[in-house]
Amino acid sequence: MPDGSVLAFDFGTKRIGVAIGVVMDTRLDAGRFGPARALTVIDSESNDARFAAVASLIAEWQPVRLLVGRPLNEDGTPHDMTARCERFANQLRGRFRLPVDEVDERFSSTEADAGLRERGLSWQQRKTQIDAEAALIILQSWFDAHAHATNHAPA
């Protein structure tokens, strides 16, 4: 996996949360992941506006990989939003010619809201930040899975 930035998306029908992180020194014996943070929320229901915003983020951050949260039911089965998120991931692959991984995002929004609540944010403040925070949780989950796989790879 090449070094560089990674953009993560928490896809929703009204908003898309975005987070950014960095992959550094990914040799099997030294894979590391740099700082990750919630970046922004794309607050538009228009596909043209959404993809224009994504294109702008890709131009600015030059990511080497994109991540899309894949929502599932608690038991791991797909639900109505799963196909929409998979379609969004496929559109990203086709438009931007970057690797796109789909990441299990069960409970990411719930976890994001709880974290924002712990920081003392009001409901109105949480509402504007929850999608970007959920994208950060998706990104951190992917980092954790890849760090675990890297640290347990055979020598």
Image (cartoon, rainbow, N blue to C red):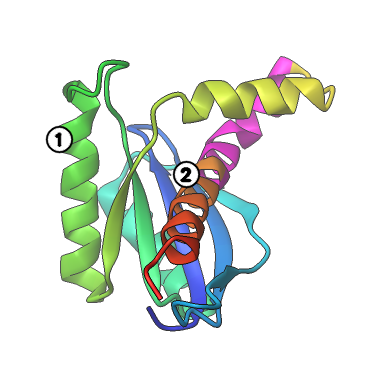
The percent coordinates of residue 63 (x first, y second) are 45, 75
Residue closest to the eye, 149 or 123? 149
Magenta part, dominant SS: helix
- Residue occupied by mark 2: 138
Q: For the residue carrying disc 1, how many other residues have a C-alpha within 10 Å: few (<14), some (14-19), or many (20+)?
A: few
132 inside magenta stretch = yes
Q: In the picture shown, does residue 96 fall above or below 9?
A: below
For label 1, the SS is: helix
- Residue 47 circle label: none
Q: Residue at x 48, y 55 (%)?
A: 148
138 inside magenta stretch = no
- Residue 64 visible in image: yes
Question: What residue span does the magenta drawing correspond to?
Answer: 123-136
- Residue 121 visible in image: no
The percent coordinates of residue 3 (x first, y second) are 49, 82
- Residue occupied by mark 1: 83
Rendering quarter of residue 85:
top left
